[in-house]
Amino acid sequence: MTVCICTRGRPDNLALALASTGGSTYPVSQVVVSDDLHDPATEVVCHDAIVDVDYVLGPRRGLGANRNRAIAASNGEIVLFIDDDCVLPPEFLETALKRMQSAEHRYGAGLVIVSGRVLERGQLIAPGDQTFLGFQSKRYTRSDGLRSIVMAATIFPARLFSAVRFDPELVYGYDEVDLATRAVATGYTIVDCPAAIVEHRPSNIGRERNLSYSEASRLHVTLRRYAITERAPLRAVAFAIAAPIHHIAANVRRRGLIGLGIALRTIGLAAVMAWRSR
């Protein structure tokens, strides 16, 4: 079992996350920290942690590329990504692994992904299916065969990453949707596990920077899902027309003419992502 933590300038939060991995009732064989800031304070935290940490330097290209760096350093048969501002409850891994083993009887060994819940500010965050415009706001009515996950509460079979990796163009946001939909298309099954809960204590450090990329990621990831992953060209064309119009209108309503400029920059960024990922 490998726990991967991608971090960028949050050594105090990271220290709590690392400490929590040591209390797991299911033994963690490896902890990988991929540091995208190359921060000396972060390296010290990893050196002083109560668990052994494989500290690696991220590529400084954003979260998608940094997750891939962590994967390259991992050696466990099961992989969990938690955020650097998360706390791993003692029973999480044991609970999620029991769900995985049960589902494997039906879907095959090594072919099951388990998504749990994240507890954030007193609210439980569950996987949400995407709307046509890509927002994760649709409730699932089933517990098997999901098409999305909650990243910080999901365990993956490591073999998945031989076929599917994170999009390195995704600096922040919607990387979990992109990975999940491509994993399903490759033959993996995502199952829900409401009893497996990770606590998220949101840090404000880097939050504004991250949010600036989120909408561009939604546009890029959803278009690629329709056009490439699901091979639905008519749906992709409809999205390519409707999504930018909706995004511009929403920003103009909220911010006026300033919102127009913001929306156009976001659409431009999404176009660059799509071009580089082609």
Image (tube, rainbow, N blue to C red):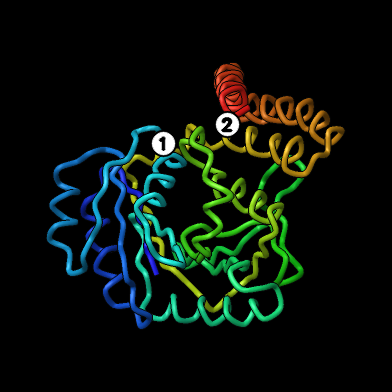
The answer, for residue 259, to whether it is visible in the render is: no
Residue at image mark 2: 216
Mark 1 in CB contact with mark 2 (< 8 angstroms): no
Residue 270 vs residue 74: left or right?
A: right
Question: What residue is drawn where x is 28% and y is 44%?
Answer: 35
Nearest the viewer among 77 and 189 is 77
Residue 238 vs residue 83: left or right?
A: right
212 relative to 42, above or below: above
Q: Quadrant of the N terminus?
A: bottom left
Residue 129 horizontal/vertical position (percent): 70, 55
Residue 103 vs residue 169: left or right?
A: right
Nearest the viewer among 205 and 113 is 113
Q: Quadrant of the C terminus?
A: top right
- Asked which secondary structure carries label 2, the reply is helix
Q: Residues within 10 Å of mark 1 (few under 14, many from 20)?
A: many
Residue 187 horizontal/vertical position (percent): 70, 59
- Asked which secondary structure carries label 1, the reply is loop
Three-letter amino acid code at the position of disc 2: Ala
Question: What residue is drawn where x is 75% and y is 70%?
Answer: 142
119 relative to 238, above or below: below
Residue at image mark 1: 62
Question: What residue is drawn where x is 63% and y is 66%?
Answer: 111
Lower sequence index among marks 1 and 2: 1
Three-letter amino acid code at the position of disc 1: Gly
Nearest the viewer among 264 and 14 is 14
Residue 103 horizontal/vertical position (percent): 65, 77
Q: Residue 231 appears in which quarter of the rendering?
A: top right
The single residue placed furthest to the right in the displayed view is: 234
Residue 237 horizontal/vertical position (percent): 82, 28
